Image (cartoon, grey):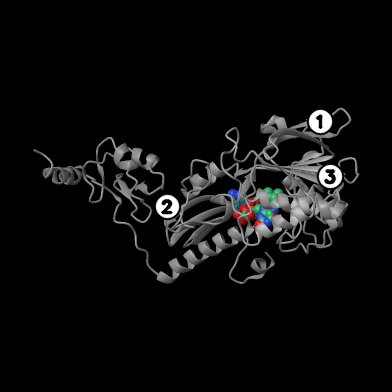
Amino acid sequence: MMDAGRHPNITLLTYSEVEAVSGYVGNFTVRIRKRARSVDEEKCTGCGLCQEKCPTKVIDTAYEAGMGKRKAIYRPFSQAIPNIPVIDRENCLFFTKGRCKLCEKVCPAGAIDYNQQDQTLEVQVGAIVVATGYGMWDPRQLPQYSYGLSPNIITGLQFERLVSAGGPTGGHIVTAEGKEPERVAIIHCVGSRDVNAHPYCSRFCCMYSLKHAHQVREHTGAQVYEFYMDMRAFGKAYEEFYERVQEDGVIFVRGRGAEVEVLPDGKLRVKGEDADLGRLVSVDVDMVILASAIEPQPDADRVAAIFGLGRTPDGWFAEAHPKLRPAETATAGIFLAGCAQGPRDIPDTVSHADAAAMQVVRLFNQGEVTISPTVAVVDEAKCVGCGECILACPYSAIARNLRGKAEVNPALCQGCGTCVATCPSHAIAGLHFTDEQIVAQIEGLLEGVLV
Ligand SMILES: Cc1cc2nc3c(=O)[nH]c(=O)nc-3n(C[C@H](O)[C@H](O)[C@H](O)COP(=O)(O)OP(=O)(O)OC[C@H]3O[C@@H](n4cnc5c(N)ncnc54)[C@H](O)[C@@H]3O)c2cc1C
């Protein structure tokens, strides 16, 4: 991140969102909304005095996953690049009640700007890489795990904050009562590989759960019970790490953790089936860590519409080909990297991002683009300019020309045929796939077999 922040050829637009994309490969126009931080980026030195003095504390549901608090003026996460805070206008006393302004008073650089407005920028780019990652699935959707009923039932992400030196407990693994746990249960596949939630495997939970088991053993010496269906230790040196965690003394229970019960004394009872022993088991513990599923970002529909991306049935952005073109999309010049395309751990994300970057380099080095000849063409004499095809086109490849007729941009058209089927005037056909040509091909094929 630091390197990206310093690189002369990289412009970081943080706290910003893409609102619209038009154009085609080599020639995209991207409209970006740069949200108002209420802090002047040019003046701010990142000294942190404003955050220190701000009197308003709010639960941080984003970076701290609800485990800690932040101020109303805050840096979204530690090591943020650029190191510039933002005012959360929904909680800031000045924005909600018209008083306070302490941050403005203490800022030595005079960087606080309550009047700052969102800015709209337009940039021209030749290619786009979508790397919007994943969202966390909420385990409340499977009530048998009692998530939300005890502060000691936490997700893997919350455990990450607990064990982090910069987290709310300074890296001490403690229960909500402030005591080190004596017994901890980790439940795999909560919401993954489950027809009641997500049928797919979230891929990295097995390995981070092993990491969590190791951290609990190392930091607290607590007894750890790990409920798993099967261990997916598929990467380089992962199996060896699994063996090491077994040697750490973690008790592995092969079977889905079925239920977590909050007992009257606050202890947690985890019930499940031990498939190896062929019987039901139950353990009482002080802390439960749920390895909850990941899912496409909540705004994936909107992002897909902006970039003209397809989705696979499970909601992830669709690659052009799962084996041969995993970083490309069906739209030329738009690429995917990381979990936006599907669950993958950091090494696989880095490889995927490298692949996407190389695709862009290759595209730019080529200097010209080869497009598929299978595109839609409009017969202007038949087109009545109703615009049905424009609405139907999933790739935003059709627009009205100066004569009010539909015109297909061959650089964007993927030849899917939706417009051909939609056009009420039968004015659109696939190039070399007119009805007459298809009928002639069928007749040719059948010639030998007809008697
Ligand atoms: C609890 C837990 C522990 C893990 N531990 C490990 C581990 O030990 N080792 C390992 O290899 N992997 C681990 N992982 C997996 C790791 O988090 C992922 O492999 C990695 O984060 C994927 O990176 P990404 O860039 O694809 O997605 P993300 O990390 O999700 O990054 C996507 C980024 O895009 C931003 N974004 C989203 N939408 C938009 C938008 N519309 N506009 C602009 N920005 C947007 C997001 O804010 C985010 O910063 C763990 C995951 C979890 C949940």
Locate residue 117 relative to residue 362 in the image: left or right.
right
Where is residue 280 shown, x and y percent of the image?
A: 72, 32
Q: Which residue is mark 2?
A: 330
Task: Judge depth for marks 3 and 1 and give the one in front.
Answer: 1
Q: Is residue 294 above or below residue 352?
A: above
Task: Judge depth for marks 2 and 3 and give the one in front.
Answer: 2
Q: Is residue 266 above or below residue 52?
A: above
Give me the residue at 82% from left, 48% from top.
71
Tag 2 near tag 1, CB within 8 Å: no
Mark 2 is on which residue type?
A: Ala
Q: What's the distance in space between the residues labelled 2 and 3, CA to CA?
A: 45 Å
Q: Residue 38, can we see it? A: no
Where is residue 399 shown, x and y percent of the image?
A: 36, 47
Task: Judge depth for marks 2 and 1 and give the one in front.
Answer: 1
Q: Earlier in the sequence, mark 3 or mark 1?
A: 3
Q: What's the distance in space between the residues labelled 2 and 1, CA to CA?
A: 49 Å
| Residue 151 in which image quadrant | top right
Is label 3 in a helix, a strand or a loop? strand
Label annotation for residue 57: 3
Q: Is residue 78 above or below residue 228?
A: below
**Few, some or many residues within 10 Å of mark 1 (<14, 14–19, 20+):** some
Label annotation for residue 262: 1
Mark 1 is on which residue type?
A: Val
Q: Residue 139, can we see it? A: yes
Locate residue 91 relative to residue 33 in the image: left or right.
right
Can you name the residue that lies furthest to the front here? 277
Give me the residue at 50% from left, 46% from top.
304
Is label 1 in a helix, a strand or a loop? strand
Q: Earlier in the sequence, mark 2 or mark 1?
A: 1
Can you name the residue that lies furthest to the top here? 264
